Amino acid sequence: MKKILIASILTVAGFFVFSAFAYAQTPTPIKLQIVQPTGALTNLNTILTAAIQLIIIVAGLIAFVFLLLGGIKWISSGGDKGQVEAARNQIIQALIGLVVVLAAWGIIVLVEGITGIGLGFSKPLKLPTFYGTPAPTQQTCTNGGSSVGCNCPGAATGGICYYP
């Protein structure tokens, strides 16, 4: 008990002796500047183009993996008619998947070539831009209505003229 009490007293005394002093100071403000990294994807067209290309590549790879797994099943079937038929069906389905992926890629490239619209393969993806009706422009007319574009009543007296 005595050893625990002495160890506790020495520990507390050590905290006071070896601790650093804390001075109350006004903190210096830190300026945090977040810089956009170089090469960052900030354009929606670039992101969508990469997503479309990634989907086509992943679909092709998945079909190819299923084709390989079907071949492995066929080899390891051991002559069992049921397993050979299942492996054969898997290989056929994987080949159909590859044909669909290649056909989708071919159709996209064909549509890009015929229409000139960029869908993300041979040309960059370009989203349509919609423009609303522009707001009317305002001009104060002076000099008896001689200002350019002021052909409205009240322009001769310094009125405001609106024109599209």
Image: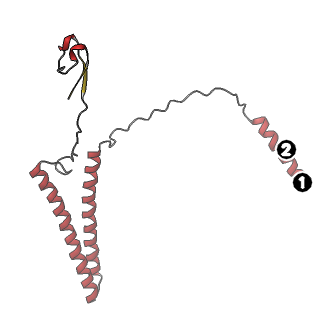
Left or right: where 23 falls relative to 99: right
Q: Where on the picture, by quarter, is residue 38?
A: top left
Q: Quadrant of the N terminus?
A: bottom right
- Judge whether 24 appears above or below 94 on screen: above
Q: Nearer the viewer, residue 6 or 30?
A: 30
- Judge whether 120 appears above or below 89 on screen: above
Count of all numbered marks drawn on residues in the image: 2
Q: Where on the picture, by quarter, is residue 70?
A: bottom left
Q: Residue at x 20, y 64 (%)?
A: 101
Instruction: Find disc 1 in the rendering and name its residue.
Output: 1
Q: Position of residue 46 (x, y in %)?
A: 27, 46
Q: Residue furthest right?
A: 2
- Judge whether 28 appears above or below 157 on screen: below
Q: What is the secondary structure assignment of the residue under circle 1?
A: loop
Q: Badge 1, how many Cα within 10 Å: few under 14, some, many 20+?
A: few
Instruction: Find disc 2 in the rendering and name its residue.
Output: 9
Q: Position of residue 118 (x, y in %)?
A: 17, 48
- Judge whether 49 appears above or below 104 on screen: above
Left or right: where 118 falls relative to 25: left
* Residue 79 is at least partly visible in this image: no
Q: Badge 2, how many Cα within 10 Å: few under 14, some, many 20+?
A: few
Q: Say which label, 2 or 1, has the lower sequence index.
A: 1
Q: Residue at x 87, y 47 (%)?
A: 6
Q: Residue at x 16, y 50 (%)?
A: 122
Q: Amino acid at mark 2?
A: Ile
Q: What's the distance in space between the residues labelled 2 and 1, CA to CA?
A: 12 Å
Q: Amino acid at mark 1?
A: Met
Q: What is the secondary structure assignment of the residue under circle 2?
A: helix
Q: Position of residue 161 (x, y in %)?
A: 23, 22
In this picture the colour scheme is secondary structure
